[in-house]
């Protein structure tokens, strides 16, 4: 299927590794020029080189910076001549017990996982509507649908974004101008973040890493972790010209882990 995206420009935030990188790669493979961001230059440049090899015809631009800051967002937005596709992503907040979290921790989580995506949407969405094409995909978490008790900061901040997006996506001035806004909800995907989480759990339980890794894997009906490429493929489809009638949705990608009928 030709996704009809050749020559478009995408800003993919937090994309040197993991799910963001998966999205950037899938879009670049479809002929989309990409601006990718991350805090560390080395991994970001290595990813940019990979993307250039994968899709020699597309432009790949890199912006080093923290996307949760005003300066990081401004630099990212400046790097693209226009943003047709926005993939919002940033690192997730740390786990813990809410009794230990002060206002500062809450504000950091809200900044990263709610207010940053909203600021980037605000900066790009009206231009998309004027041009009659726009795709916004927010990487959130399966925890929005099935909260994980130790991830209260994530549950709270991402649910705030989800509620905002539900209202925004349904505005006729966006939906009626071929601008869609959707969320992708990852379950367990094999990325650095998941490996670190499992390492921490193994250490806390005093068990070998492999045993905790396999136990969690076998708890997924698909009997495996998701691959960033699969995540990227779903993102690219949502960004495609074929997905203009899909907006305000929350797509769970979790190998069947969520147990509900709906
Ligand atoms: P990852 O650690 O593998 O990659 C994160 C990427 O984001 C890296 O490129 C890192 O450099 C970049 N990054 C992080 N914070 C940034 C910032 N402030 N500014 C710019 N770049 C930044 O993580 P991942 O597994 O790809 O996770 C991506 C998002 O999805 C996170 O918010 C995570 O909490 C969420 N998530 C992941 C899973 C999973 O199983 N992997 C499950 C649910 C939710």
Image: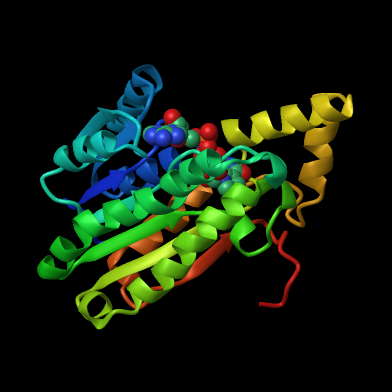
Residue 155, image quadrant: bottom right
Seen as rendered, the residue at the extreme right is 206
87 in relation to 3, above or below: above
Answer whether residue 3 is visible to the viewer in this image: no
Foreground of the two, 68 or 10:
68
Seen as rendered, the residue at the extreme front is 103
29 in relation to 84, above or below: above
Foreground of the two, 237 or 99:
99
Quarter of the picture containing the C terminus is: bottom right
Answer whether residue 94 is visible to the viewer in this image: yes
Q: Position of residue 25 (x, y in %)?
A: 37, 41
Residue 177, image quadrant: bottom left
Q: Position of residue 216 (x, y in %)?
A: 79, 43
Q: Which residue lies at the image location 37% right of the left edge and 17% below the top edge? A: 42
128 in relation to 23, above or below: below
Tell me the colour scheme of the image: rainbow
Q: In the image, 18: left or right of 142? A: left
Q: Which residue lies at the image location 74% right of the left edge and 28% below the top edge? A: 200
Q: Which residue lies at the image location 40% right of the left edge and 67% below the top edge? A: 165
Q: In the image, 4: left or right of 224? A: left
Q: In the image, 217: left or right of 109? A: right
Foreground of the two, 9 or 101:
101
Seen as rendered, the residue at the extreme top is 42
Q: Position of residue 158 (x, y in %)?
A: 52, 56
Quarter of the picture containing the N terminus is: bottom left
């Amino acid at each position: 299927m030709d996704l009809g995206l050749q020559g478009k420009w995408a800003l993919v935030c937090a994309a040197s590794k993991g799910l963001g990188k998966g999205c950037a790669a899938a879009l670049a493979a479809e002929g989309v020029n990409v601006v990718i961001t991350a805090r560390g230059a080395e991994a970001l440049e290595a990813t940019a080189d990979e993307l250039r090899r994968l899709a020699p015809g597309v432009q790949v631009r890199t912006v080093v910076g923290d996307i949760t800051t005003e300066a990081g967002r401004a630099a990212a937005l400046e790097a693209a001549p226009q943003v047709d596709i926005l993939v919002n992503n940033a690192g997730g907040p740390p786990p813990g017990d809410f009794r230990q979290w002060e206002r500062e921790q809450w504000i950091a989580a809200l900044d990263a996982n709610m207010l940053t995506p909203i600021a980037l949407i605000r900066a790009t969405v009206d231009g998309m509507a004027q041009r009659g094409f726009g795709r916004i995909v927010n990487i959130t978490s399966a925890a929005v649908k099935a909260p994980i008790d130790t991830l209260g900061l994530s549950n709270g901040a991402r649910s705030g974004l989800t509620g905002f997006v539900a209202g925004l996506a349904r505005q006729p001035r966006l939906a009626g101008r071929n601008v869609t806004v959707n969320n992708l909800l990852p379950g367990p995907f094999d990325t650095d973040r998941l490996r670190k989480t499992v390492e921490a759990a193994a250490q806390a339980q005093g068990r070998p890493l492999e045993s905790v890794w396999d136990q969690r894997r076998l708890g997924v009906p698909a009997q495996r972790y998701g691959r960033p490429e699969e995540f990227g493929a779903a993102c690219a489809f949502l960004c495609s010209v074929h997905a203009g009638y899909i907006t305000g949705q929350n797509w769970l990608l979790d190998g069947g882990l969520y147990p509900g009928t709906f």
